[in-house]
Amino acid sequence: MSATTLAWLALALPLAGAIVTALGFRFWRGRAAGYVGTAALFGSFACAIGAFFALQGEPAEGRQLVSALWDYAATAGLDAQLSILVDPLSILMLLVVTGVSALIHLYAVAYMGGDRGYTRFFSYLNFFVFSMVLLVLAGNFLVLIIGWAFVGAASYLLISFWYRRATATAAGIKAFVINVLGDVGLVLGAYFLFRGTGTLDFLTTFERAPEVFAENDGELVAGCILLLVGAFAKSAQVPLHTWLPDAMEGPTPVSALIHAATMVTAGVYLIARMHPLFELAPTAGTVGAIIGCATLLIAATTAMAQTDLKRVIAYSTMSQIGYMVMAVSAGAYVAGLFHLVTHAFFKALLFMAAGSVIAAMAGNQNMDRMGGFRRAMPFTFGCFVIGGLALAGVPPFSGFFSKDEILAYTAERGGIFLVLVLVGYVAAFLTAVYTFRMIFRTFLGEPVPEARELEQGHLHHPEHPTNPASGEIEDTEVGFPGPEHHVAEQSPTMKVAMGTLALLAIVGGFLQIPKVTHLLDDFLEPTFADSIYFEALSPSDAATFVGLGLGALIALAGIATAWLVWVREPGTPAKVRERLRPAYALFVNKWWFDELIGTVIVRPARWLGSFALTAFERLFVQGTLVGGTSGIVRAGSAAVRAAQSGFLRFYVALFLGGMVALTIWFLLQA
Amino acid sequence: MTVPWLSVAVAVPLLGAALAALLPARLTAAPRLIALGCAAVSALAVAATWVRFDGGQGMQLVEEVEWIPALDVAWRLGVDGMSLAMAALTVVLFAVTIAYGVGPRPMTRAAAALLLLLEAACLAFFLAQDFILFYVAFDLTLVAMYFLIALWGEANRRYAALKFFLYTLIGSLPVLLGIIALYLTSEPNTFDMTVLAADPAVRGAGTGATLIWLAFFVGFAIKTPIVPFHTWLPAAHVEAPTAGSVLLAGVLLKLGTYGLVRVNLQMLPDAFARYALPVALLGLVSVVFGALVALAQRDLKRLVAYTSINHMGYVVIGVAAAAAAGGASRAGELAVDGAVFQMVAHGVVTAALFFLAGFIASRAGTRDLDELSGLMRPMPVYGTLAALAFFASLGLPGLAQFPGELQIFLGAFAVWPAVAALAVLGLVVSAALFLRALQRAFLGEPAERWARLPDLHARELVALVPLMVLTVALGVYPPLVLDLIDSTAWLAGAGP
């Protein structure tokens, strides 16, 4: 089969899975829906692998295949087909998305086993993967916009999955509204480009852009910055990031899949996909790099002060995506995408391990309540440590190579980018600290009662399930988390999924060992062959080795610091907090972004709504402006009533009389 | 002999209305059966027309019977892409509404007669190629809807019905004046709309042309409605019975925008081009204002009513952009194609939303979003369909309203980027307001008194499911209707 056929199949299978599980929701028993959904994903992954080999079979210059299904809104010569573009970049994304999704589905088969919304969960999850595959395979702006919005909608459905929890539904709304704002950015960006190029097709756009737009042309820069708005909203970059931590209200497999491995990397993919435009508009690229850098620092500092286990990982995700955005905006495309791949492995792994701990805590995510799970959960502990080492950037784990490549290649741009790289190194230290803070607080120390119970082989289940965020008592019916929880130690499928990812988190970095292997470089070359940075950015041997050494040292120093502060001298955090009170306040309050957005945007919008309703609608329009017509209404009705003729008879008489009069008049005229 | 399908489509409901009104009262099942039968025949006649429609431009399948030859008044019906699309929307919405009934109670003779009369009038309006017929149909819809609201509406129905009636009556008088003016300026004098559209008699944008254009615009703006002529709409919707709201939003609002395209754009292109920007700004105000006020609503029906103002604002922007760019230009054609598609899509989606609002009101006795809660649990089917309709209404891709909005914005962006950009931002408010409504009424914990509400029953599903299927179909495969719409010759001598 051709690469495009296989890609269409990879797209169709998750959709089929979503529809089949949804239609059979009264009929599926036990874990059937989970296995159906997972099978669809493994099938999709197999197709992705097939597409990979089919594409590699093409000559290098022919590795950009476009295939269209039908005209979508193709009037007035608009080239709005449902079309996909199969090239190395989209196949790389396709492999990551379907591969990691398949593993996370496998994990969820057991993890969600106790939930009454089991079938619905897999239907949503399959729909999400379909949307994400649509997004990465999009061959034009139309399909990109469709996939982009679908991903946001699927994310909303899954964040609000426990729909009877007020905190979950509020988080869902926040995520969706910010994502729609991003959609609007993307759509407007596409309009700007369309105005110039007259096409929606990616390849044609790239072809025409240099003819239509001069370098740093105002419209092009505006269009690219609007595309960035879309990328920032989806990839949780400041200031559009506040939805991501709240999204941790969703079930943990959702956090692993959507809010770590796939959806949030869409922005990185978008910038890489649009690289011919960003290279024509370097100003926009610089903006992207600066925002990415700001995000990676803000998120890393915030992660230091959070106590919710999943939120720490969420801020870490934000921070790592900041690195990727910075890299692809600076032109270090392969480095950014490399980190995207390794991050998908180790971050999904971290979330899965965290999910296992949270299950052992019967849903509680608060690290203050955790501790000493090392002996009760050795497998989970091992996975968490592997993921943590990769995230912290300890050699030879995968994150070490990819993060190093980002910093080394971005530094090659020189100038302001050197400052950004410096910030990147500072945040790398913080990354190691907060990662191991998480590990030490959760797994070391005195075992909490839940850990002791689990050591006896008994999983703790509270008498009254409560919402960990609000403390409200919940039941275990549909719409709330189920009555039973599942930890990796007791579930072979979870172990398989986590074990596979752990392996990938260890060896994933070997794809691109500096000066040794360059598998990704070679594979992605056809996509970036026209790039001005692809060949130009290449660090010297000396810079490479200094970078590698520095990265390793920083990671180890971070871990050592975490060990000193949280294991050796457990009283230190309180003292540091005391000493650095303003900084701590800033970090624990997440840099006050929620409050800022609430004051600047949300409240004014609501106020404007009620103003429009009360003042404008009631007083101005109905009172002053339409007061006249209301008066006419009253006078007219009074006149009609006075005529005692009944309103309709009066009208019909008027109507007929008028017609007759007109007819006579016309006849006279004629 | 060829069957005059268009005349059949209009005449059968009209005769059915008379028959239903004259029935003996003891045949209680008969009114519903007659109404269903006539709606079905009408739908078949439109379907037959669609089959015979050759996809070419211009008016075709014209059926003409002389009426007042001296004035060149005739029973002229014909279709082009836009007419056929609107007629198809009309027969579908009437079929599902009649299948459901006026409200929860069985259909009476009067209700059947009025619904059929309204259907005949709407079809005559969309198919009319003669201005006198066009005007008579325009006014007849008014009468029928007045009675639907006044007889079966809620507590304050008389006031709302009267307000609706007087407002739109005031709107229809300038339309009549405009028609006479067009008749007098045409050479030779004619009421034949095909002639007037093919070769506009009024060129330029002088005082005369402006006045004629303005007369039509005011009439259609009230019907659409465009802010600030909208105040009758929320009142009418809140008091109207479910069937009334469905038809009012689904079909009757489109009379206004259809007229805007058919008359203002096609017959007065120069004047419209001159005043396109102010019209687009009014459309933008409708978009923003409708969304913001909807955000502040507690009553589900009122909320949907204001989102209608918002969505019709997009249509107005599209038509205005076409007028500014010229329907023959690419941007103009995109914008007006999108606007007409949006009319169809909005009809389907909003009809579903008003059904949904009616269904919950008939169960819970309230539509107050603050009182309702957790409905997803006792009524999962209802909740799921409502979520789907909400997502369609907020413009989610893959559902009905997306393709039209995409085309409108692509077209309008080429003409006035700022207007289009601000209008697109309205989508963010739409998203927020629909999700908030979903959260308040459907998600969370059901209050004790809602915990036993029954889910949708068969009659309600019969009305709702076809609309939801269309919502998905139009979003996934827009050419279904878009090809038809695209075949319309928007401006004389201009091809697609």
Image: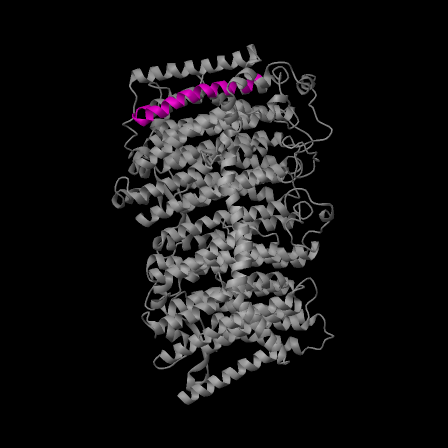
**Toward the viewer: A193 or B440?**
B440
Viewer-proximal residue among A266 and A223:
A223
Please report the bounds of the magenta region as a residue range. A411-440
From the viewer's side, name the closer residue of A585 and A444: A585
Residue A490 appears left or right of A89: right
Quadrant for residue B150, please give it. Answer: bottom right
In the rendered image, residue B379, in percent from the top left (x then y), is placed at 67, 48
- Whether A610 is drawn above or below A539: the answer is below
Q: Does residue B200 appear in this view?
A: no
Q: Look at the image and say whether residue A412 sits in the magenta stretch.
A: yes
Count of labels in the image = 0
User: Residue A669: x, y in percent?
Assistant: 40, 87
Residue A573, percent from left and from top: 55, 16
At 34% from the left and 18% from the top, the residue drawn is A516
Quadrant housing residue A555: top left
Work out which residue is located at the far top of the displayed protein and give it: A568
Is residue B367 at all visible to an observer of this figure?
A: yes
